[in-house]
Image (cartoon, coloured by chain):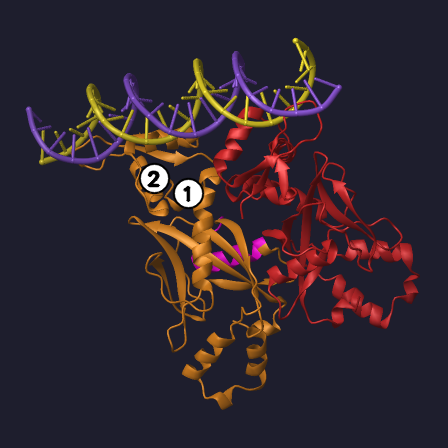
Chain colours: A red, B orange, C yellow, D purple
Amino acid sequence: MKNPSQQNYISQVSIDCVIFGYHDRQLKVLIPKINFKGDFWALPSGFVYQDEDIDQAAERILRDRTSIQDIYLEQFRVFGKASRTNKPFLDELIAFNFDKLSVKNEAQQEYDWFTKRFISIGYYALVDINKVVPQKTDLDESIEWYSIHELPRMIMDHSDIVDEALKTLQSHLDDKINAFNLLPDTFTMKEVQELYETIFDKTFVRTNFQKMILDMNVLERLEKKFTGAANKAPYLYRFKK
Amino acid sequence: MKNPSQQNYISQVSIDCVIFGYHDRQLKVLIPKINFKGDFWALPSGFVYQDEDIDQAAERILRDRTSIQDIYLEQFRVFGKASRTNKPFLDELIAFNFDKLSVKNEAQQEYDWFTKRFISIGYYALVDINKVVPQKTDLDESIEWYSIHELPRMIMDHSDIVDEALKTLQSHLDDKINAFNLLPDTFTMKEVQELYETIFDKTFVRTNFQKMILDMNVLERLEKKFTGAANKAPYLYRFKK
DNA sequence: GCAAAAGTGTTCCTAGTACACCCATGA
DNA sequence: TCATGGGTGTACTAGGAACACTTTTGC
């Protein structure tokens, strides 16, 4: 990765992405661990090129980390406190990793660029977890799916950003009907119900839930799914595009 | 006004405010006209100081234009297309107002600063129109309330920003219950109904509307309001804080 | 036939809508 | 007492919640 301060980025503006996936009745968030000593986790982030729409920038960041195109994504909030800076985190990172005297010249320039106050635009993405092949950047030690209830301790206000993203997702589900982006192409009604129960952290009555979803009129019923289990085979559904 | 490029602003980030007021069954927006030849209208805007929260910046911009404190305001969207720049507008303004050869040195520096691509954070504000004393800045020729249905032709994407603000206001009314910020301290139920009918551009049945609003349980009933009219005096209400 | 899970229908209740009715006010 | 507009209650209805019932599947 080239030095950001040398890139044609808009300065002091960043994009932070909360990438939601769903697996095994758990809502998950894709989070990289930074490749330095000291256990630092940070949301997939990036900056905006001068000639790039912010939506394009978010798409680029997401594509780089998930290796899939056409991701469902929504801008949900700007985080703009004057105190929003990487400085405490960077200083801690440097203390763990470098002799302080060694930070000079070019490094100093990067340091100055990174430790300015940043305004961050929050996006959330909904992806089919099976289609994602998580990609490390060369700054990442690892990149993993974490259950939203067992997130690692993240830098800056990234935990708050995840909280806000979840709230927005919940409030959007009613009108935007976008939850199906978290499921595979075809799915059973039971899977939809489990997803909703996970997102809202509450249970639904099976029969009424089925009615509610079908009344949305956004699903098409396909063939039955025979699992070999000793019970009635459920229908598969697909989201109408 | 000092030259923005000399101020301690975050560059390429602006704040645009849609200030909603309500009068005479009309939803209005407070819009300054720029003090140059050529008829340019632009939303109340400003920039963010390095040591200032974006919310504070929005409050400052609003205070400067309305001369009231404690304004209800909500961040609603970021406008971040790569093509978002003041350049076409500024060039037109300069063509109307200056000999091109006169734009030099210091002016050139301001020109360069202003014509960069800007990411703008949209805020909407709800104010009691009676409490506002619109304030011109020294860049303004005038500042007026315009009916949302008769807005002047504004620069850049400011019309789109107003549209987005209105949509967000409508969608927020259900859960945020913030419409009362547009009314005086005390008001009758009829006034509330007319306000809602204006915002949603539809009519409500009087008796059911009263029930709906009272069931929100956010109003306290005060004394009656005797207008001298030959009919039953309506109660005044106040929004519980 | 039986257990398990899926699909459909039926009843009940609540919340919203339409509307009838009465009340207060000043001319 | 009359016209006008405000306040309250009641009947009706649609949509949601609870639940009973039937169907399908493999052992």
How many other residues sit within 10 Å of disc 1, few (<14), some (14-19) or many (≥20)?
Answer: many
Q: Residue at x 35, y 42 (%)?
A: B196
Query: Which amino acid lies under the numbered mark 2 shown in the image of this protein?
Result: Val
- The correct choice, above or below, for A196 with respect to A13 in the image is above
Q: Residue at x 77, y 66 (%)?
A: A112
Which percent across, then down, holds residue A141? Answer: 85, 53
Residue labelled with disc 2:
B192
Nearest to the observer: residue A25 or residue A79: A25
Q: Amino acid at mark 1?
A: Ala
Q: Which residue is mark 1?
A: B179
Q: Chain of mark 1?
A: B
Residue A56 is at least partly visible in this image: yes
- Secondary-structure class at tag 1: helix
Mark 2, other Cα within 10 Å: few <14 / some 14–19 / many ≥20: some
The front one of A47 and B64 is: A47
Region of the chain picked out in magenta, as a range: B55-70
Q: Are marks 1 and 2 on the same chain?
A: yes
Question: Which quarter of the rendering shows the N terminus of chain A?
Answer: bottom right
**Mark 2: which secondary structure?**
helix
Disc 2 chain ID: B
The picture quadrant where one finds residue A106 is bottom right
Front-most of residues B100 and A63: A63
Mark 1 vs 2: CB contact within 8 A:
yes
B92 over D13 or under it: above or below? below
- Asked if B2 appears above or below C6 in the picture, the reply is below
